[in-house]
Image (cartoon, grey):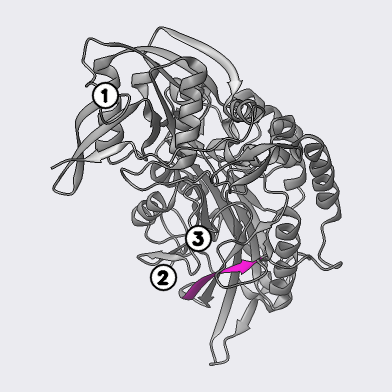
């Protein structure tokens, strides 16, 4: 890949920096050895991109259950280990003559008790000490509303990036920038933040009032504005791997893209054309590293990606003291309530994204929701259930990890026609991840391998078919009731009752009465 030089027309991706400028690079931004001999007589410039994404408030390490045939299973990750590793690896890379940038792909605090303290404010104060050069705003940063996020950004020194979202008056969101230009060993690197335009359908309703631009178009505009003021552009995105690939096709001269949102473990990265895309899973489990080498003419000679594990405790020389103190305070505050045992599960609460399969966790949530609301039917989005829980004792922390979002119960009065249409869309529209449900049974036929709704039965497989003129009470969570996941059909319903009991509190109330065993019953029948 040959990248454009300073003075060329159009958005510049790479500028050959004179050797004198490299030798005069500021302390802390690399070493005079940033131009190194490759060992084969070639002089190369080496860039290391360290990246994180979808940390979701993960202060504490968690069991590395993805490891097979390992006993005992080690703990992995957590913010203190992640921050220490970033500093350790960055220092090693700089000492070896590489330029280093540290990026984050969004979704910072939502997902743990520690992350929810003061609506994320405490966790962001800790995260600000991790040393990121640029951090794109994720969709979950808006979960408590636009004003809450803007308040956090006003108070905290976060290098927040957001190029494709504007306030209704067209101005940038206060506390965010379209891009940040950092200098590393004489290189001027433009970091650009891009967020998924699906955000208004998956988070707080206030985001619907913001102005949203297609990420690829926004990047074109930013690159035009930057022109030859930068040597390299790195998009930091929260749009998911498929959209990252589309972005790479729209901007084929990008050497790398730092991604987030889809929680994808790209252990060796993914290539789209000449662009290397990196993403590091989720929950501070690993750190991503991408290495790119350029020759003296500014041409990419090679690039590679890998993940750095976080199984070990930091050594004294790498610890980030301010961050660790903030994390310890968060854990102490959360543990007072979260570590209390609240009951016993008689069976595991499982999750599933498999088509036409009900998960025990979803069965329990919707069964309890329907019972509490006195409803005929209940539904819950699969994406709202974030972990599995084993049979046995359950703490309040476990329930939070299962249902971290502050969703309450809403009950809607709906016609049989609308309820039937809701379930038809849930299984027939490919963009949907499906819903868990209670109170109905679906008869489905596979047509060319794709499910089609045949009949919707009230109760169970022996129940009566729901008719268009039926009047039904449907209980759901407040996220779906407000149109989340694109469910405008639910948002349009005018008659509704609101129960401000959170879903996780609903389960805790059930556990207080004795052991709770989730149903294993499958609520689909595939017919010929």
Near mark 2 (Cα within 10 A), the count class, few <14, some 14-19 or many ≥20, is some
Q: Nearer the viewer, residue 503 or 143?
A: 503
Q: Is 166 included in the stretch rendered in magenta?
A: no
Near mark 3 (Cα within 10 A), the count class, few <14, some 14-19 or many ≥20, is some
User: Which image quarter holds the C terminus?
Assistant: top left
Name the residue beneath numbered marker 1: 463
Q: Which of the marked residues, 3 or 2, is nearer the chain's N terminus?
A: 2
Q: Is 308 included in the stretch rendered in magenta?
A: yes
Disc 2 element: loop
User: Which image quarter holds the N terminus?
Assistant: bottom left
Percent coordinates x, y for residue 527 in the rendering: 17, 40
Disc 1 element: loop
Distance from Cα at disc 1 to Cα at disc 3: 43 Å
Rendered residue at 48%/20% (across/down): 371
Distance from Cα at disc 2 to Cα at disc 1: 66 Å
Q: Hey, which quadrant is residue 522 in on the image?
A: top left
Is the C-beta separation of discs 2 and 1 under 8 Å?
Answer: no
Q: Please state if 454 lies on the left or on the right of 98 as rendered.
A: left
Q: Classify 62 as above or below 454.
A: below
Q: Nearer the viewer, residue 44 or 107?
A: 107
The disc at residue 265 is: 3
Disc 3 element: loop
Rendered residue at 79%/44% (across/down): 331
Q: Please state if 335 lies on the left or on the right of 489 as rendered.
A: right
Name the residue beneath numbered marker 2: 2
Q: Which residues are magenta?
A: 302-309
Q: Please state if 110 lies on the left or on the right of 331 as rendered.
A: left
């Amino acid at each position: 890949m040959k990248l454009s030089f300073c003075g060329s027309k159009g958005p510049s991706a790479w500028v050959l920096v004179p050797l004198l400028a490299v030798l005069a690079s500021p302390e802390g931004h690399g070493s005079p050895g940033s131009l190194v001999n490759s060992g084969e007589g070639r002089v190369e410039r080496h860039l290391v991109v360290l990246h994180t994404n979808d940390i979701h408030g993960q202060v504490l390490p968690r069991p590395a259950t993805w490891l097979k045939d390992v006993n005992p299973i080690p703990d992995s990750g957590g913010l203190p280990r992640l921050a220490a590793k970033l500093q350790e690896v960055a220092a090693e890379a700089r000492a070896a003559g590489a330029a280093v940038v540290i990026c984050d792909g969004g979704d910072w605090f939502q997902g743990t008790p520690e992350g929810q303290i003061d609506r994320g404010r405490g966790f962001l104060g800790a995260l600000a000490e991790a040393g990121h050069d640029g951090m794109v705003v994720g969709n979950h940063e808006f979960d408590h509303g636009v004003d809450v996020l803007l308040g956090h950004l006003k108070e905290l020194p976060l290098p927040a990036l957001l190029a494709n979202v504007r306030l209704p008056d067209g101005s940038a969101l206060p506390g965010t920038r379209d891009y940040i230009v950092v200098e590393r060993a004489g290189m001027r690197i433009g970091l650009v933040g891009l967020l998924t335009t699906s955000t208004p359908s998956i988070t707080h309703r206030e985001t619907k009032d913001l102005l949203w631009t297609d990420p690829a178009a926004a990047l074109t505009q930013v690159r035009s504005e930057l022109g030859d003021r930068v040597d390299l552009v790195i998009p930091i995105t929260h749009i998911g791997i498929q959209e990252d690939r589309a972005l790479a096709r729209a901007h084929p001269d990008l050497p790398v893209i730092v991604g987030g949102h889809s929680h994808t473990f790209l252990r060796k990265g993914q290539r789209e054309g000449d662009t290397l895309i990196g993403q590091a899973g989720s929950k501070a489990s690993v750190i991503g590293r991408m290495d790119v080498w350029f020759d003296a003419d500014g041409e990419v000679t090679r690039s590679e990606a890998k993940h750095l594990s976080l199984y070990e405790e930091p050594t004294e020389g790498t610890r980030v003291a301010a961050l660790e103190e903030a994390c310890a305070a968060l854990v102490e505050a959360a543990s007072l309530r979260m570590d209390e045992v609240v009951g016993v599960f008689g069976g595991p609460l499982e999750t599933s994204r498999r088509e036409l399969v009900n998960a025990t966790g979803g069965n329990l949530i919707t069964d309890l929701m329907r019972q509490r609301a006195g409803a005929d039917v209940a539904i819950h989005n699969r994406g709202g259930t974030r972990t599995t829980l084993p049979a046995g004792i359950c703490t309040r922390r476990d329930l939070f990890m299962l249902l971290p979002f502050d969703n309450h119960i809403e009950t809607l009065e709906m016609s049989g026609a609308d309820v039937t249409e809701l379930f038809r869309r849930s299984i027939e529209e490919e963009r949907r991840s499906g819903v868990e449900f209670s109170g109905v049974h679906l008869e489905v036929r596979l047509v060319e391998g794709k499910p089609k709704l045949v009949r919707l039965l009230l109760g169970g497989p022996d129940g009566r078919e729901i008719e268009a003129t039926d009047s039904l009470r449907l209980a759901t969570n407040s996220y779906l009731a407000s149109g989340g996941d694109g469910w405008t059909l639910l948002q349009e319903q005018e008659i509704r009752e609101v129960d401000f009991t959170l879903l996780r509190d609903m389960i805790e109330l059930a556990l207080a009465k004795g052991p709770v065993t989730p149903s294993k019953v499958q609520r689909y029948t595939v017919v010929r």
